[in-house]
Structure formats: C-alpha cells, structure tokens
Amino acid sequence: MLRFETSLWESGLHVVAGVDEAGMSPLAGPVSAGAVILKPGTRIIGIDDSKKLDAAAREELAKEIKEKAESWCVAFVEVEEIDAINIYWAGIQAMQRAVRGLGLTPQHLLIDAKRLKEIAIPQQAIIKGDARSASIAAASILAKVERDAVMRAVDVRHPGYGFADHKGYPVPAHYEALARLGACAAHRRSFGPVRKVLGLPPLPPWPSASERETD
C-alpha cells in the first residue's frame, strides 16, 4: 500500500498527497473528497479502500489518519452545484477543493483514477488507487466518514427517507421512500430516479470517460 509513496519519498519528494472522492452514486446529498499527506514512513495498520471496511473500522481509522497525517482536508460540493455541472465535474471540483484546503502545498499528487487539470502539481492517476495506495485509501476513508456524518444531519432535516442508514445511495429502501414521499431538497435533480419522481424529462447522456478527459 506504500509502494507509490515510498518511490516518491526516496526520490526526495516528501510532501505527497493522496486524493479520492466519496458519494458519487447517491441520489441525495453532497459529494465529498479527501486529500491526505502522510509523513514519510507512516504506517497505519488496516488501511484499505473505504468500501471494503465497515463503519466502525472507518471511524477508528479516520481518527488515526487525522492524528498521524502531516495535513488533511475534506471538501464538499453541494447538491445545487452537482445539478449545475453534473456529478463527474462535481467530483473533480471536490478533489480540487480538498487539495487546495491542505495546510501545505503537495509536491506530488496520487489520485484515484482521475486527473486534476486545474491543479498545477505533478500527479499520477492510479486505477483502483484506493486499494493500492495508502494515502489514497486514507483520503477515501476521511471522505466517506465525513460525508456519512453530513448525511446523518440530513436525515434529521429530512426524516423518513432513511438517510442516516443508506446515506443517500440508490438502495431499495431509498427508492421506496422516494416513491412514497417524493423528492426533498437534499435530492440530486440531475439524477434519473429523482427526475422521474418529479416528472422531469431525462437529461442527455454524459460524455464517455475518454471524452471527458479531453474536454
């Protein structure tokens, strides 16, 4: 999990940030992104892709990551912004905000499968990076834990949807609540199931991933 970081550390680049987002597929709530700079040689036992960990493990690891990290930041892009620019670009925006929110400027970025063209820092996109890089995994854990906390607060403001349980993801219980209660202010109106409930027409399909990268 540290092979990418170790190679950079050994080359003299000691300020390496891992970057990842969380909450791309939910029908409701913001998208979040984490950026984490680990000190050279840092070891955090049990760190892994946040999706492979249960909530309790993520919470414990998040505390250790925050204690041991040289710097960390979690940033959000809210529902209104998601609907204005689409979820792909919202994820990019959240990652850019997380990097810019760090307490020191990274010398290199390790990013889960994406590039941040607006950030003038050398960077490497790593496919399945959250399972291959400790700093990307750390960023994914913080992004997930912080977003889950936001969704618990959303559940208080919009009871009945089960946001505290499913965190806005498209699961059967969420579809049932959406059909029964209609959409609330926390729902992403650019997402098909929400548009259907609201009686809105489908949006045109997004460009393919390769087309997005060339935009």
Image (cartoon, grey):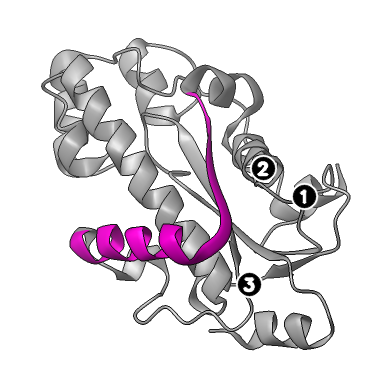
Decide: is 153 above or below 131: above
Residue 129 image-quadrant placement: bottom right
Of badges 1 and 3, the one in the foreground is 1
In the picture of the structure, the residue carrying the numbered disc 2 is 92
Mark 2–mark 1 distance (CA, rounded to whole Å): 7 Å
Indicate the amino acid at tag 1.
Leu
Counting the numbered discs, the total is 3
Residue 206 visible in this rendered orientation of the protein: no
Q: Earlier in the sequence, mark 3 or mark 2?
A: 2
Q: In front here: 82 or 73?
A: 73
110 on left or right of 138: right
Q: State the image coordinates of residue 78 (x, y, percent, origin top left).
A: 50, 24
* Residue nearer the viewer, 58 or 50: 58
Which residue was labeled with disc 1? 116
Badge 3 amino acid = Ile
Q: Position of residue 89 (x, y in %)?
A: 67, 37
Residues at discs 2 and 1 in contact (Cβ within 8 Å): yes
Give, as a single range, the part of the protein colored magenta.
56-78
Horizontally, is 5 left or right of 42 in the view?
Answer: right
Mark 3 burial class by Cα count in 10 Å: few <14, some 14-19, many 20+: few
Q: Is residue 156 magenta?
A: no
Query: Measured along the vertical axis of the image, is residue 54 above or below residue 200?
Result: below
Crowd tier of the residue under label 2, counting other residues whose Cα lies within 10 Å: few below 14, some 14–19, many 20 or above: many
Name the residue beneath numbered marker 3.
127
75 magenta-colored = yes
Of pointers 2 and 1, the one earlier in the residue sequence? 2
What SS does tag 3 mark? Answer: loop
Q: Amino acid at mark 2?
A: Ile
Local packing at callout 1 (Cα closer than 10 Å; few below 14, some 14-19, many 20+) is some
